[in-house]
Amino acid sequence: MSIAKGRKQQVCKKRAGVKFIDFAPFDYQAFTVTAGEISTIPAAITEVFRYEVKGAQNVFSSEPTVSKENGTVEYKEGLIAQLSGVSKESFVESGQLVCGSYLAFVHDFNGKVYVGGLTNGLDVLTAPFSTATMSVLVTAEGMESAYPPLLSSAAIIALEALVSTQYVTP
């Protein structure tokens, strides 16, 4: 089989975009990735913080860069998320995002969950607040050694159990 032969485009009704994002502090958790999928959430992750996002400006991307000198490939991950509906509590919480590196569990509208910052964390570069949109626009990036893996259905169920109902306090 040759990859040069291409693949047939499947006819399906898929919706693009980001539905919500779960953040967890990055602490070099040991994930096991098999064939691009994570089947379990490490026990070190005890809580994640969910942000619902709306609009087309929310983007999670991974861009490979190949070194011509040594043949290595690095993947620059980028996350742009407009955290809207900011309350007093969530405003303080989103301000804490600039204080460290994070894992981002990015949920799309098709039931898939991508894990960003898996081996090196995502570093928040900016998080400005706007009264025009009553939102915080988070920009984060990181370098990884592969495309972001997906969570298995069992790992998605385990992640749901970790979503915090509390706000982060300073």
Image (cartoon, rainbow, N blue to C red):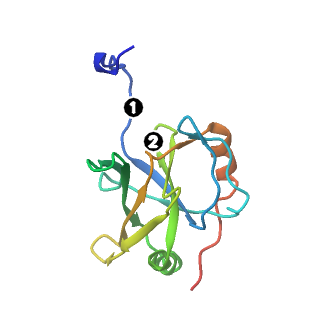
Q: Quick one: SS at disc 2? A: loop
Q: Give the residue at mark 1.
A: 14
Q: Quick one: SS at disc 1? A: loop
Q: Earlier in the sequence, mark 1 or mark 2?
A: 1
- Are the two marked residues, 1 and 2, in contact with CB atoms closer than 8 angstroms? yes
Q: Residue at x 56, y 66 (%)?
A: 26
Q: Give the x, y percent position of residue 57.
A: 30, 56
Amino acid type, label 2: Phe
Q: Quadrant of residue 109?
A: top left
Residue that lies at the very extreme toward the front in this rendered image: 69
Residue 109 — which label?
2
Q: Give the x, y percent position of residue 54.
A: 38, 55
> How many numbered tags mark residues here?
2
In the image, residue 130 sits, relative to residue 115, either above or below, namely: below
For label 1, the crowd category at 10 Å Cα-Cα, with few meaning under 14, some 14 to 19 and many 20 or more, is: few
Which quadrant of the figure contains the N terminus? top left
Which quadrant of the figure contains the C terminus? bottom right
Depth check, front residue: 116 or 158: 116
